[in-house]
C-alpha cells in the first residue's frame, strides 16, 4: 500500500464560541478565536490517499481529479469566507479545527467516487490552523 499526500491552502475567518459555556470561559478557552467579530487564519490542508498503484499507469490516482474535488468541495466554498456564516455545517456547530477537519473529510468522502477516485481510498485529512496546531482524521473506520 502506498500513501500519497496533496497539500492545499485557504484563508477564512471564524469565531469560536460554545453556547454551553460562559462568556469568560469561552474567552479563556478560545482566546482571540473568541473575538466577537471573528478573526482569520491561513489554513493548510493535507489530503492523503492510500491504495495500490494502478498496474498500467503506475499511479495511485489522478492528482488532477484530487485537486478538482478539493477545489469544488473545500477551497471554493471556504476560501475568504466566514466559516460560521458561509459553511452550512457550522450553523450551530463551533468551527474549531477539530470540527473543520471532520467537515472536510465528510465533504471529500461524499464526492470521492463521483470524482473518479474510487481506485484509491481517502486515508487522512489534516488541517493546520497555526504553526503550533495540527489536526488529523483518519475516517470513521480507523482503528482507535
Ligand atoms: Ni481562530
Image (tube, grey):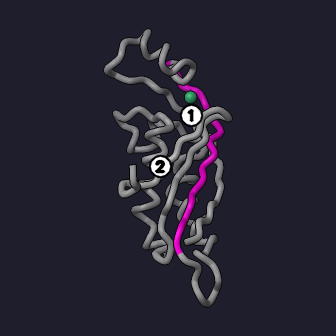
> Which residue sits at x=59%, y=75%?
60
Left or right? Give the position of 44 relative to 69. right
Picture layout, residue 71 above or below residue 58 = above
Residue 37 colored in magenta in the image: yes
Outermost residue on the bottom side: it is 56
Residue 43 in percent (x, y) is at 62, 42
Alpha carbon distance from label 1 to label 2: 22 Å
Residue 23 colored in magenta in the image: no
Residue linked to disc 1: 13
CA neighbours of label 1 inside 10 A, class few (<14), some (14 to 19), many (20+):
many
Residue 93 in percent (x, y) is at 37, 35
Which quarter of the rendering shows the N terminus?
bottom right
Picture layout, residue 58 above or below residue 123 = below
Q: Which mark's residue is nearer the viewer, 1 or 2?
A: 2
Element class at badge 2? strand
**Of the image marks 1 and 2, the number of the one nearer the N terminus:** 1
> Which residue sits at x=54%, y=65%?
49
Residue 20 in percent (x, y) is at 31, 20
> Which residue sits at x=54%, y=25%?
38
Element class at badge 1? strand
Residue linked to disc 2: 137
Left or right? Give the position of 31 relative to 59. left
Magenta: main secondary structure: strand
Point out the stretch of residues depicted in magenta. 36-51
Amino acid at each position: 500500500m502506498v500513501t500519497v499526500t496533496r497539500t492545499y491552502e485557504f484563508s477564512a475567518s471564524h469565531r469560536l464560541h460554545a453556547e454551553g459555556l460562559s462568556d469568560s470561559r469561552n474567552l479563556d478557552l478560545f482566546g482571540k478565536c473568541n473575538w466577537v467579530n471573528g478573526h482569520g487564519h491561513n489554513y493548510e490542508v493535507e489530503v492523503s490517499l492510500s491504495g495500490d498503484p494502478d498496474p498500467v499507469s503506475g499511479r495511485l490516482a489522478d492528482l488532477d481529479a484530487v485537486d478538482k474535488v478539493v477545489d469544488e468541495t473545500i477551497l471554493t466554498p471556504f476560501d475568504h469566507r466566514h466559516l460560521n456564516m458561509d459553511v452550512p455545517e457550522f450553523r450551530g456547530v463551533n468551527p474549531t479545527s477539530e470540527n473543520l477537519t471532520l467537515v472536510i473529510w465528510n465533504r471529500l468522502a461524499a464526492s470521492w467516487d463521483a470524482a473518479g477516485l474510487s481506485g484509491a481510498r481517502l486515508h487522512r485529512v489534516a488541517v493546520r490552523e497555526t504553526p503550533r496546531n495540527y489536526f488529523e482524521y483518519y475516517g470513521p473506520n480507523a482503528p482507535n
